[in-house]
Image (spheres, helix red, strand yellow):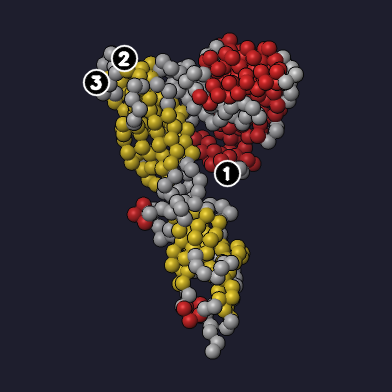
Amino acid sequence: MWWHIYSAAFVLLSVSSPGEVPASDQPDSAVPMISSRSMEIAYQVPSQAYPLQRVELWITRDSGQSWRSVGLDEDLHPPFAYTADGDGHIGLFFVITNMAGASSAAPEPGTQPHHSIRVDSTDPLIQLQQVKIMPVQPQSHLLSLAWTAYDANLGQRPMAIFFQRQEETGWHLLADNVENNGRFDWPIPDQLRGHVQVKIQVTDQAGHQQSAISNFVLVSQANTATNTLGSEADISVAQATPILTGMEEIVPTSQPATTPSGSVLDVYKLGLWHKERGDYGQAINQFLECINTAPEFLPAAYELANIYYAENNYQGAMNIYKNILDRYPEDRDALRGCALTQVALKQYSKALVYMDKVLLKHPEDAQTWLDTGDVFVWMGERESAKKYWSEARRLSQKNPTINTAAQKRLEKLVSTVDNK
């Protein structure tokens, strides 16, 4: 007896992954969302169709205009383990074969998929750009927040805002289901006093979350507030500068971001989106457009310098940092960017000039003390390195990352000397 599998005789039951989005949390779409690129696809074949000879999965990323095979089910039994090569909309089509033949021919342009999914394995992007106290009446103030959040699959109200007093370990929910319009104003309650910080959290439709946390601000008895633990009254957060081997991550915070126009902010968001996914060419175009339209919007300049640095275009990164310093000679992030770029060029003496300027203005900057020690080691000046690493360790008692890095460097320095 010959058995044959007809195309209607097998059923694609479901697609699941370790991070599958529950049905109740799915976005309003007939296409299910999968939050991981690794998944298992359940299919069903009538028992009389076994034994199977071949189970092949085809996918399309352009709604059936083109198809490609992505592999075979080795054990010929469901589920089919599949890892997507990227996020986005994916159409699935199975060709299942037994002794009698295939369930159908391989899909051709125009063939409709058996099943479609949307894969979103990427965390959202979020930057906290401003935390500012704004008076509205003599004894009444607002805590004004500004942020940028972006993801391909954000819902209509993906934001949540929390606050925490300095002496507390937990967060208080301030507002949930907030629109992603980049702005939120909180009337400060009369009874709130002391140091307070704010956390903004974004959740995409696949369930991925990211958050940004501000520095502490001091809410005084007069219901006014000042930033006592940061360097400026406005707290500005930009993306991390690419780092060198042996140097820790830098998060620029010195120059408050100027709020751009809506169109510039949209371009900036798109640039971040491309950068996060490694599409540097498109990201560069977006950041250059921001800079040409709004030269005072420094986050775009920092991001462009970051990309140039990552692509070893050190002169391009240096030019951007110097342009910032022409307008803001004491900008810590631009000074550090110049220093790290000079290190990458092995111009260690020039790097020290910029690092000295940072430490002259910010002697509490443990990260720069650590990095300066690294430069001295590369210059062969071990005693100077020991001095700077020791100071980095002393200043970083509340920062375990820097403290541990400094301690390890000092221990390695001692062991190197002992082995000589």
Q: Quadrant of residue 178?
A: top left
How packed mark 3 is, by other alpha carbons closer than 10 Å (few <14, some 14-19, many 20 or more), is few
Where does label 3 land, which residue?
191
Quadrant (top left/top right/bottom left/bottom right) for the C terminus: top right
Q: Quadrant of residue 276?
A: top right
First-in-chain label (3 vs 2): 3
Q: Is residue 264 above or below residue 79?
A: above
The residue positioned 55% from the left and 12% from the top of the image is 363
How packed mark 2 is, by other alpha carbons closer than 10 Å (few <14, some 14-19, many 20 or more), is few
Q: Nearer the viewer, residue 198 or 42?
A: 42
The residue positioned 34% from the left and 30% from the top of the image is 170
Q: Is residue 113 above or below residue 166?
A: below
Secondary element under disc 2, as helix, strand or loop, is loop
Secondary element under disc 1, as helix, strand or loop, is loop
Where does label 1 land, which residue?
277
Quadrant (top left/top right/bottom left/bottom right) for the N terminus: bottom right
* Amino acid residing under circle 1: Arg
Question: Percent x, y for residue 296?
Answer: 54, 25
Q: Is residue 103 above or below residue 29?
A: below
The answer to whether any part of residue 321 appears in the image is no
The residue positioned 40% from the left and 36% from the top of the image is 201
> CA–CA distance between discs 1 and 2?
43 Å
Q: Is residue 385 above or below residue 207?
A: above
**Contact? badges 3 and 1 (CB < 8 Å):** no
Residue found farthest to the front: 419
How packed mark 1 is, by other alpha carbons closer than 10 Å (few <14, some 14-19, many 20 or more), is few
**Contact? badges 3 and 2 (CB < 8 Å):** no
Where does label 2 land, which residue?
220
> CA–CA distance between discs 3 and 1?
45 Å
